[in-house]
Image (tube, helix red, strand yellow):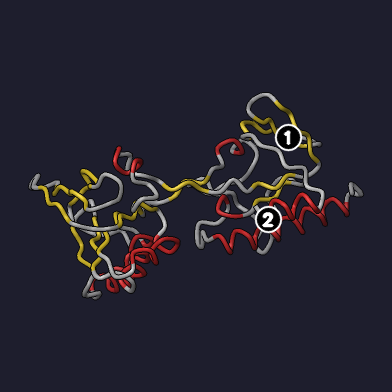
Amino acid sequence: MDFEAQAKRMGADIRYGIATKVDFSGHPHKVWIDDEKLIEANSVIISTGASAKWLGIESEDRLNGFGVSACAVCDGFFFRGREVAIVGAGDTAAEEALYLSKLCTNVHMIVRRNEMRASKIMQDRVLNSPNIRIHFDSVTEEILGEKNVTGVRIKNVKTNETEEIPVGGFFVAIGHQPNSEIFKDYLEMDETGYIITTPGTSKTNVEGVFAAGDVQDKTYRQAVTAAGSGCMAALDAERYLGAKGLH
């Protein structure tokens, strides 16, 4: 709210809605809001972020924010001295499990296959952490709890045996999906949909269009780095407009 008030004092025109379509084929650039309102702009900064991938079970949605999280670095502190579970097998999951192991008594890592996808060095670090227990060949059947997470029920996909583990927190680390679908016809992206920017800048392949935050960053994905890249995009856009005489 403080940031919004500051932006208003600086003259920002703040509106609410969802960008549903764009046309970056010419100038000015066009953005449609809620499929109805058309906004034309000499420059556009894209900061639509990335959404965490979820397991898709009912209890995950119901307990989201009440012990279920998709960011151990963001929320791990709240579970200091408690037992937690994390689902995932890649570098991010390993990194977050290691982070949690420094805060929590025990970390249960739920891995679908009989091996992890993380790099060898990350796997070694996880395997050598005494308070991280890896449950291989396992999937999450249910997150337990009415108002808060109290446990998780997992199933071994080879034996079909189930196990209930008492935990106070459940973290999902199975990846993120950048919110970039509406830009795919105009902007260069990597194979997973992250917008490609010129290194050291926020510039995209379309003149006058800039990208900031998690929609173009699959490495750091933190609020502070997103804010920094937002500042870069604002400066890049200002310089672009000035060079074009569009101020």
The crowd level at tag 2 (other Cα within 10 Å; few <14, some 14-19, many 20+) is few
Tag 2: amino acid: Phe
Q: Are marks 2 and 1 in contact (CB under 8 Å)?
A: no
Residue 92 in picture, x, y percent from top left:
39, 61
Residue at 29% from the left image edge and 39% from the top image edge: 57
Q: Where is residue 129 in the image (x, y as percent from the top left)?
A: 25, 74
92 lies above or below 21:
below
Q: Is residue 184 above or below residue 205?
A: above
Residue 34 placement: quadrant: top right
Image check: 30 left or right of 168?
right
Q: Which residue is drawn at 23% across and 61% down?
A: 108
Q: Nearer the viewer, residue 18 or 62?
A: 62
Which mark is in front, 2 or 1? 2
Which residue carries the number 2 mark?
3
Q: Is mark 1 on a helix, strand or loop?
A: loop
**Tag 1 residue:** 25
Tell me where residue 89 appears, x and y as whole percent: 30, 57
For this orientation, the residue located farthest to the right is: 245
Dot 2: element: helix
23 relative to 60 in the view: left or right: right
Considering only order in the chain, which callout, 1 or 2, is on the residue closer to the N terminus?
2
> What's the distance in space between the residues labelled 2 and 1, CA to CA?
33 Å
Q: Which amino acid lies under the numbered mark 1 shown in the image of this protein?
A: Ser
Local packing at callout 1 (Cα closer than 10 Å; few below 14, some 14-19, many 20+) is: few
Query: Which quadrant of the figure has residue 132?
Result: bottom left
Question: Eyeballing the image, is 98 above or below 58?
Answer: below
User: Which residue is most to the front?
Assistant: 147
Residue depicted at 61% across the width and 46% down the height:
188
